[in-house]
Amino acid sequence: MTDLTKLTAAQTAEKIASGDVTAVEVTEAHLARIEAVDEKVHAFLHVDREGALAQARAVDAQRERGEKLGPLAGVPLALKDIFTTEGVPTTVGSKILQGWIPPYDATVTRKLKEAGVVILGKTNMDEFAMGSSTENSAFGPTGNPWDLTRIPGGSGGGSAAALAAFEAPLAIGTDTGGSIRQPAAVTGTVGVKPTYGGVSRYGMVAFSSSLDQGGPCARTVLDAALLHSVIAGHDELDSTSIAQPVPDVVAAARNGDVAGLRVGVVQEFRGEGYQDGVIQRFDESVELLRELGAEIVELSCPSFAKGLAAYYLIAPSECSSNLARFDAMRYGLRTGDDGSHSAEEVTALTREAGFGDEVKRRIMLGTYALSSGYYDAYYGSAQKVRTLITRDFEKAFEQVDVVVSPTTPTTAFPIGERVDDPMAMYLADVCTLPSNLAGNAAMSLPCGLAPEDGLPVGLQIVAPAMADDRLYRVGAAVEAAFQARWGHPLLEEAPSL
Amino acid sequence: MPGISREEVAHLAKLARLELKDEELDHFAGQLDDIIGAVAAVSDVADEDVPPTSHPLPLTNVMRPDEVRPSLTPEQALSGAPAQEQQRFKVPQILGEE
């Protein structure tokens, strides 16, 4: 009998639509897998067994009535715990929201439900999506299924680990500086940050509103495209949502091709701090693109060198403002309300008790960067760097169709190694955050294992805003060529849990 | 640019409504000093004639007709409240006795 947890989302949907298998059987197989391995992996913060089975039964009933099913109907999904889910806890990995049951669905949640996607539960993440390792979760770290003593990336480590551990074929992440792509890279999975404004932020707990972008996570490029097309599109509940048609990412993923494509290699994305095995696999990927008919163009984007510094001013500045809403008055934790403290004191006591170290660091950093006397030097200058980075991308995209780089400078590092060294942790996002600053579209997909540690390496593809389809066209071609070379998907080499 | 002192961190924590413990102040002061030292690199462009970018999209106000629509009920809106009374959020004392 087929192991239903090993199928792709596309295969699963096809089997359900044709009646080969029921959505309930698929859901039960994944719930059993979670039961069997998640104690070790800790990808999930909450498993919604009843909700998942109810949704699966609804899909099966739809099919029995002869209704046409959507392209992902009945397929299970792991939802990052940053999206509100009506009646289901949403913590954002923080004690400050522990036990909170949202009274409404995020737009992404609603679209998934309407598409018949089965939401298995909510996945672990760095608190408020601040981090690159999922160690900043208030509810304990997640293990990387390739090596449980290593980080699964972050902030969306739970979503990526759920895919790599075959607990779900689909997941949703959010990417503010790389939180979809970096976890994808270090777990050997596929993750896409759509163009900023491509997927609604309504009901997605805000960290840094000009950078945050929800997007699809999967084990294959086609599955990511199918999920992308379900969640993307204009939403009047998000005033920064783009009122334009979504690029046809599914057609692009079905027609992988790079012949004649101009591919840019940015020289700033290598050198000190990059692991040898990562550079080796990246160089092989560039060679592969050349063999597939792409034209390789060497580029320089000098402003990218200041991207990290600009990002770690802009994101904390926006976070210090966004997180002011956690004031212990309307929802979430309240501490110290014993009659002896004023409202202001209760707010300060609650935030002290409810936020973890990284969140506190970033709130204070942002408060500092925005304070009078420092605003121009820090936040103002960071905004200028943002302009320069956007211009570097614009110049690059005059010469090339896509830009490629390693997704992250190293493979998965050991849990605990960087947790109290913020600057070392921040370096994990050095290749991914320029795309958040510029608002363009980017993907990470597996390009092999680093020879020195046998851990996955990610290839990042970047396309101009609203050209998300290019990511899938290139990604599908690269994925097919690598799998032909390897003889199987990369995840087959992961140890069994 | 100057580094950040323990006193400044205490002031920031107050502004940010974080009731930090003494040991946290020591711990964060060192880390924030390191981070600020690293991110100060952005100031090299301070004099350059570059317009700032606050957002990736050219934003304009998005308007909709001002009409009554379905929304959360009072019970739903209050469902996460730490304390409530008479269909209102109940908060600790805001003003002094005087």
Image (cartoon, rainbow, N blue to C red):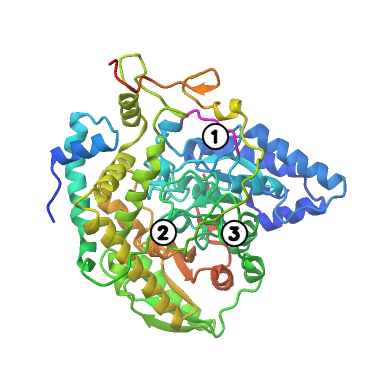
Image x and y of residue A438, in percent: 41, 65
Label 2: which residue? A454
Determine whether label 3 and label 1 are within 8 Å by CB.
no
Going from N to C along the chain, the mark reached first, 3 or 2, is 3
Task: Please identify, in this view, whether the residue under mark 1 or under mark 2 is nearer the observer.
Answer: 1
- Element under disc 3: helix
Front residue of this view, candidates B90 and A141:
B90
Q: Is residue A275 visible?
A: no
Q: Which residues are magenta?
A: A98-104
Chain letter, disc 1 residue: A
Residue type pointed to by label 2:
Gly
Image x and y of residue A436, in percent: 42, 61
Q: Which mark is residue A46?
A: 1
Q: Which mark is residue A224?
A: 3
For mark 3, does the 10 Å Cα neighbourhood hold few (<14), some (14 to 19), or many (20 or more) residues? many
Front residue of this view, candidates A426 and A12:
A426
Is A100 magenta? The answer is yes
Most frequent secondary structure within the magenta stretch:
loop
Residue type pointed to by label 1:
His
Point 54% across, 81% down: residue: A292
Separation (CA) of disc 1 from disc 2: 31 Å
